[in-house]
């Protein structure tokens, strides 16, 4: 499966050559044309009120993206919740990607400090947030509107909709779209020929843009992106920049936290099941460590005991000083703490550093207070 994924990625980015690659690329392009048309039809049906939108009784802020893969939605959701929780009773609603089973009804994951679910029930990203933050409500709900009803029952007066940009059914006060400044739009094609989840025209719905990983590109590139976004979304309220900030290393089994300097000059065996695996590798290297081996799993991969045993064997063969993964992956490994024991098995904690933070927060607050949902 990994080799197939890598092959398709090379076809999409054009690095795979030959007749077979050209034929597959052509097929993917034709499928992407169909996908794009279906996406436009769906959007038009909602815009013309043929498919009905529903409005929650409390303000909704959507946090999303237009590409597949990781753009930093979860760290930004955490940032926003932390900044606003003193003024609002916040509920974070997510579909619960990475959960072991689908559930029809909204599912309360956490309220205040009471945790009601494990990672397999909540999904990796939602569980990661829930275990780190109190005074917040966490709800898993495929039907976001039904999720808002549960949020209201729990006393919420503000909803943060995780990965909500493509969820047209629920009206929102603001759409915040995160974009990876380093690889903003893949090859500018929609799925499956590229990584765009919708055609570029969808960006006109966005109110606020956040260019994440801006530390990896130069100023001129940022200005180009800002110009492009102004063309794609003429009425947007602002473009902001964010950098990935490395916080610390935490032992998976004991939860002992180490300073980031702990990684300096260490040889690392890394693995991840995230949407942006290369970004994780760069983060490790930026902390002064050497990645001697890197195992990549599918995004939201559900680790089993056999996977852990294989990883431990690969770590031993790599002669690395330690094993390192992401926090999103680590939350699915806590049940294996006894197997991990005293092994040097860590995860990397990250956060976002937002430029013009106060300006961004004031803009979001104005969208909340305005009260109009679209």
Image (tube, rainbow, N blue to C red):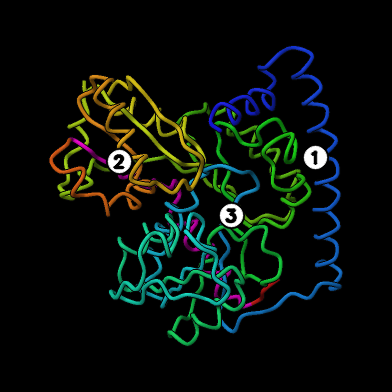
Q: Say above or below: 220 vs 336.
A: above
Question: In which quadrant will I find the N terminus?
Answer: top right
- Residue at x 29%, y 75% (from the top left corner): 114
Q: How far, Cα to Cα, is label 3 from label 1?
A: 21 Å
Q: Residues within 10 Å of mark 1 (few under 14, many from 20)?
A: many
Lateral position of residue 87 relative to residue 13, left or right:
left
Query: How many C-alpha atoms fall within 10 Å of the one at disc 2: few (<14), some, or many (≥20)?
Result: many
Nearest to the observer: residue 126 or residue 28: 28
Question: Residue, x 49% and y 63% (percent of image)?
Answer: 362
Disc 3 marks which residue? 64
Q: Residue at x 72, y 55 (%)?
A: 235
Q: Secondary structure at mark 3?
A: strand
- The label on residue 330 is none
In magenta segment, residue 197? no
Alpha carbons under labels 1 and 2: distance apart: 36 Å
Q: Position of residue 252 (x, y in %)?
A: 23, 46
Q: Earlier in the sequence, mark 3 or mark 1?
A: 1
Could you tell which of marks 1 and 2 lies nearer the N-terminus? 1
Query: Which residue has dot 2 on it?
Result: 348
Q: Tell me which numbered mark, 2 or 3, is placed earlier along the sequence.
A: 3
- Pointer 1: what residue? 32
Instruction: Quadrant for the C terminus, please.
Output: bottom right
In the rendered image, residue 261, in percent from the top left (x then y), is placed at: 19, 31
Q: Are marks 1 and 2 in contact (CB under 8 Å)?
A: no
Decide whether residue 356 is among the magenta residues.
yes
Q: Nearer the viewer, residue 272 or 352?
A: 272
Q: Is residue 287 left or right of residue 40?
A: left
Circle 1: element type: helix
Q: Position of residue 161 (x, y in %)?
A: 54, 65
Observer-side mark, 2 or 3, equals 2
């Amino acid at each position: 499966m990994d080799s197939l994924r890598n092959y398709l990625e090379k076809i999409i980015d054009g690095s795979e050559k030959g007749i077979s690659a050209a034929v597959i690329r052509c097929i993917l392009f034709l499928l992407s044309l169909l996908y794009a048309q279906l996406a436009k039809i769906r959007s038009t049906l909602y815009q013309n009120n043929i498919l009905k939108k529903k409005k929650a009784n409390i303000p909704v802020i959507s946090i999303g993206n237009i590409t597949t893969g990781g753009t930093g939605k979860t760290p930004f959701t955490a940032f926003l919740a932390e900044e606003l929780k003193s003024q609002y009773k916040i509920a974070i609603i997510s579909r619960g990607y990475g959960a072991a089973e689908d559930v029809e009804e909204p599912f309360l994951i956490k309220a205040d400090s009471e945790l009601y679910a494990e990672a397999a029930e909540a999904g990796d990203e939602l569980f990661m947030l829930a275990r780190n933050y109190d005074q917040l409500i966490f709800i898993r709900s495929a039907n976001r509107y039904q999720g808002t009803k549960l949020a209201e029952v729990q006393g919420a007066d503000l909803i943060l909709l995780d990965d909500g940009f493509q969820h047209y059914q629920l009206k929102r006060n603001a759409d915040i779209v995160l974009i990876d400044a380093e690889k903003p739009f893949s090859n500018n094609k929609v799925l499956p020929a590229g990584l765009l989840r919708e055609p570029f025209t969808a960006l006109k719905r966005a109110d606020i843009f956040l260019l994440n990983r801006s530390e990896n590109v130069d100023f001129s590139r940022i200005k180009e992106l800002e110009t492009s976004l102004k063309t794609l979304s003429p009425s947007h309220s602002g473009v902001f920049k964010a950098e990935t900030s490395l916080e610390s290393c935490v032992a998976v089994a004991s939860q002992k936290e180490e300073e980031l300097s702990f990684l300096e000059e260490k040889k690392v065996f890394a693995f991840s099941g995230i949407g942006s695996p290369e970004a994780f590798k760069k983060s490790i290297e930026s902390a002064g460590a050497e990645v001697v081996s890197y195992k990549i799993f599918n995004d939201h991969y559900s680790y089993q005991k056999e996977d852990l045993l294989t990883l431990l064997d690969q770590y031993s063969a790599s002669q690395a000083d330690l094993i390192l993964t992401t926090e999103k992956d680590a939350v699915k490994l806590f049940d294996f703490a006894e197997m991990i024991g005293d092994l040097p098995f860590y995860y990397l904690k990250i956060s976002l550093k937002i430029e013009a933070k106060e300006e961004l927060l004031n803009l979001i607050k104005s969208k909340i207070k305005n009260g109009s949902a679209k």
